Amino acid sequence: MGKDVIIACDFASGAQCLAFLDQFENEKPFVKIGMELFYAEGPAIIREIKARGHKIFLDLKLHDIPNTVRKSMAVLSGLNVDICNLHAAGTVAMMKAALEGLTREDGTRPLLIAVTQLTSTDQATMENDLWIHAPIDQVVLHYAENAKAAGLDGVVCSPLEAGKVHAACGSGFLTVTPGVRFADGEVGDQKRVTTPAQAKALGSDYIVVGRPITAAADPVAAYRRCASEFVD
Ligand code: C5P
């Protein structure tokens, strides 16, 4: 898959999400569905969006014992989504089990990417709460290398980390990057942001964009602006 814009569909209900997607008549954006919508609507919303022709990144961030993650990933694989994810903190063994579960009988599977450290975690909380005593950028790279060693396809990270991840894990190892804002837009609660054009220059493979598109007066125009800065 090439570079693409993934819209974070952070809606509270399936009806809201589908009404949002109805606005796109000439394109079928790649969408990210997270825990809120999945827990509200269940697998039916995934089937509905898939049937409409969208690619889906199912952002459920699994983290449990390897056996449970293997079996859960096998269920998610049956939904025919395009990207799934998990926490690299679950260990290399858990990530390998996830890949086994995700792989279908014919050998095909969705892409699998890992969360390294959440962007809500900073150096102080990592040290005080998680009891990890190393610089956070080294921890992020170590977790990315673990994901690569387990056979995963990439990581979720900041565009600002994409270059280091590619240098450590190879240019084919995917960097899927949230924290994207237009140069003239609201930053909101995102702390370290880049524009779509900067994310492209930094080597991001996919940008995940939520509110700059979903809360825009004209979401279709905002999506096209993202795509023209990032993809074209
Ligand atoms: O609205 P906004 O563009 O900030 O949405 C970004 C999306 O990416 C949200 O769904 C958010 O949960 C997700 N995300 C993030 N930072 C991470 C991982 C996921 O912003 N490190």
Image (cartoon, helix red, strand yellow):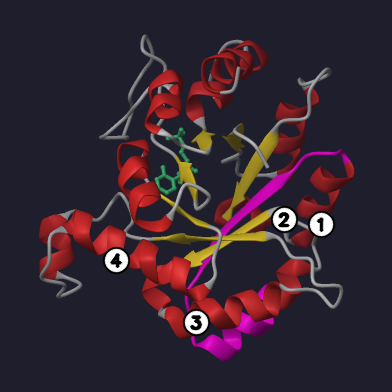
Q: CA distance from mark 1 to mark 3?
A: 27 Å
Residue drawn at x 18%, y 64% as measured from the top left:
126
**Residue 221: quadrant of the picture:** top right
Q: Amino acid at mark 3?
A: Met
Q: Amino acid at mark 1?
A: Ala
The residue identified by callout 3 is 94
Sequence order check, earlier mark of 2 and 3: 2
Labelled pair 1, 2 in contact (Cβ < 8 Å): yes
Looking at the rendered image, the disc whose residue lies closer to the viewer, 4 or 2, is 4
Q: Is residue 50 left or right of residue 20?
A: right
Using a 10 Å C-alpha cutoff, classify the residue at mark 3 as few (fewer than 14 neighbours), some (14 to 19) or many (20 or more). Answer: many
Sequence order check, earlier mark of 1 and 3: 1
Classify mark 1: helix, strand or loop.
helix
Query: Residue farthest to the bottom?
Result: 67
Total of numbered circles in the picture?
Answer: 4
The residue identified by callout 4 is 142
Q: CA distance from mark 4 to mark 1?
A: 36 Å
Q: Position of residue 79 (x, y in %)?
A: 79, 62
Q: CA distance from mark 2 to mark 3?
A: 27 Å
Q: Please tell me whether residue 160 is drawn above or below residue 213 in the rendered image.
A: below
Labelled pair 2, 3 in contact (Cβ < 8 Å): no
Labelled pair 4, 1 in contact (Cβ < 8 Å): no
